Amino acid sequence: MDVSHNNNQQDPLGAVPVIAPGYSYKGINDKLSALVLTHNTPTAWFAFMAVGFSLLMCLLMSLTYVLFKGVGVWGNQIPVAWAFPIINFVWWIGIGHAGTLISAILLLFKQDWRTSINRFAEAMTLFAVACAMIFPIFHTGRPWLAVYWLLPYPNVMGLWPNFRSPLIWDVFAVSTYASVSALFWYIGLIPDLATFRDKAEKPIVKKIYGILAMGWRGSARHWHRYETAYLILAGLSTPLVLSVHTVVSFDFAVSNVPGWHATIFPPYFVAGAVYAGFAMVLTLAIPLRAIYKLHDFITMRHLENMAKVTLVTGLIVVYGYACEIFFGWYSGSLYEREMLRLRIFDGFYPWAYPALLLCNFIVPQLLWIKKFRRNVAVLFVVAMFVNVGMWLERFVIIVTSLSQDFLPGSWAQFSPTRWDFLTFAGTIGLFITLFFLFVRLLPMISIFEVRTLLPEATTKSDGGSH
Amino acid sequence: MAHHESPSTPHHGLMAEFDSAQALLDAAHKVAGAGYTRTDAYSPIPIHGLAEALGMKERKVAPFVLMGGIVGMCTGYGLQYWTSVFSYPMNIGGRPFHSWVSFIPVTFELTILFAAFSAGISMIVLNGLPLPYHPVFNAKRFSLASQESFFLAIEATDPKFDAHATATFLASLHPREVVSVDH
């Protein structure tokens, strides 16, 4: 029986290989571990860290002020009680989806180009979820009480959460997602941490990576269980990642607010999450590739494939917009139809919908053209448009629906305050800080998985001679 | 694998180093064919069929995951059923206390959570990790096992082990070198 296992399949269209030719095991180890085990930190790293850390200080300041004064310092009011915190929450959670999609779903589909981008995409997921979780917790107003509002535990008051509410489903979905993503990420790191342990020269560095690697020695039996566990984790993460944004969309779709109450929401939210996530992976991959000269590992093929996924999911999102409009019209409900008219034409925010279409629909159409998909600058600009567009999408969904709902007498225009912007910018700072710390301290490209892409990693069993 | 060495064992065993994954896999087949059972191979990449070639039959990770998933499912549903029907029944818009449809998302999430942690933890525990000390690290070039080199060890506790004959046998497999590993 031929059990040959070839990881080195080239692009069927004969385009670009997943890693540049001419690498050996040693070349890969040296190149990828030298990104961390070195004294030379690129100047650009300090520049990004300076920006990220300054913004992180803004987050600490604004959250302190929010705690000191109360959530009234944000622009949230009645009827727009959700406002920025929930927009930002959904935006960050959406970004978090690409990491697991790349590491789990593309693994199951045997897309070997995922290998050099999965590690930092998973890190991005973790940090995006961390940023996301800040918002609902602080939005409760008194986060120190949030434990008993959010988590079921036997408290002295004898109270339990209401499990019929999508908001509690959301707590479970997001916390499960954060925990499983962290586990998946750590398990993936173990063999690379062992490589760092064995390559590091300073005793203290050796010790730290040694403790983290838990004594991994690459035994055949260990690898066997490792691969089984990794594959199972990928299989479990796949429905999980789809469920998370589905549950987030239930926060909206289960209510009866015009503009939220639509059955298209779960698939449309999941597609939007993947769309936003891939745009963010591109936003991070392009500068990383330039700063660390990773052109051999993050090749044009990676960027082009990511651009294609972005384009496809973007079109699904646009299909979602079309469905929303159709559902609103077809419902025959006066409120749904009025909400659509106000959202698109003459509500409080007439600029928002055209801006959304520009960012999420018109600009990404550039990706149909191969020349643009292979142009790093164009890709980066399109990814930035999508990042903004996906934030605008949540703004449109949340703010336009809430500010003008059933009773015109209770309509009110929401306007964000400086604290809204500072908190949001602050979480971007947290994200940048965590991400660049990760890049400095841990292997941002999965070293052992890149090794398996080499032709010499391919083995043929001699067919059971024993 | 937790191998129980007798205190009188002078050393861990003999270790041969190979240059490629294919050489290691071929050698593993030959070592198993020669009747050695207490063996292990070390490589910087997973090699398909290598553990089987060395006689590994254990398949425990998947059953643990299944058990974890079932426990998670029962925990999730049980928690919601007990709190919503017995401990703190709330009338929410006239819905039944046992609103099973609403209980599905949390049940699903906990199933995944428990199953995933069963996968991770069972892999680590079955592998005997974390393990602060293992004799194979005494071999001088073993740090390359996590980088670019491939090793095959026959342990001294193997019933067929004989310091001289085993060394000669390993040398016949065309390794880069054969070393004796201290315990």
Image (tube, coloured by chain):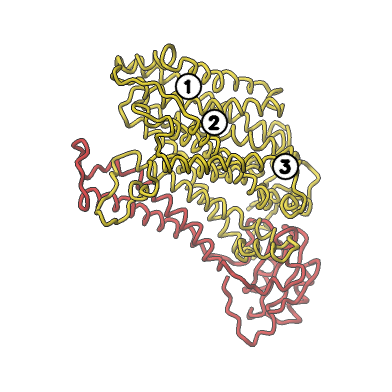
Chain colours: A yellow, B red
Q: Amino acid at mark 3?
A: Phe
Whether residue B140 is situated above or below residue A59 in the rendered picture: below
Q: Residue at x 76, y 53 (%)?
A: A39
Same subunit: marks 3 and 2: yes
Locate residue A266: give its quadrant. Answer: top left
Q: Residue at x 33, y 43 (%)?
A: B104
Distance in Å between CA atoms under marks 1 and 2: 13 Å
Q: Which mark is residue A319?
A: 1
Locate residue A399: give its quadrant. Answer: top left
Distance in Å between CA atoms under marks 3 and 1: 34 Å
Q: Is residue A324 visible?
A: yes
Q: Secondary structure at mark 3?
A: loop
Query: Whole-percent x and y of residue B139?
Result: 74, 72
Q: Which mark is residue A275?
A: 2
Locate residue A363: give its quadrant. Answer: top right
- The reply to whether dot 3 and dot 1 touch (C-beta < 8 Å) is no
Quarter placement of the C terminus of chain A? bottom right
Q: Amino acid at mark 2?
A: Tyr
Whether residue A6 is situated above or below residue A255 in the rendered picture: below
User: Mark 3 or 2 closer to N-term?
Assistant: 2
Q: Residues within 10 Å of mark 2 (few under 14, many from 20)?
A: many
Distance in Å between CA atoms under marks 3 and 2: 23 Å
Q: Which mark is residue A458?
A: none
User: Mark 3 or 1 closer to N-term?
Assistant: 3
Q: Nearer the viewer, residue A94 or A111?
A: A94
- The reply to whether dot 3 and dot 2 touch (C-beta < 8 Å) is no
Same subunit: marks 1 and 2: yes
- Relative to A122, is A291 on the left or the right? right
Chain under callout 3: A
Residue wearing tag 3: A297
User: Mark 1 or 2 closer to N-term?
Assistant: 2
Whether residue A108 is situated above or below residue A410 in the rendered picture: below
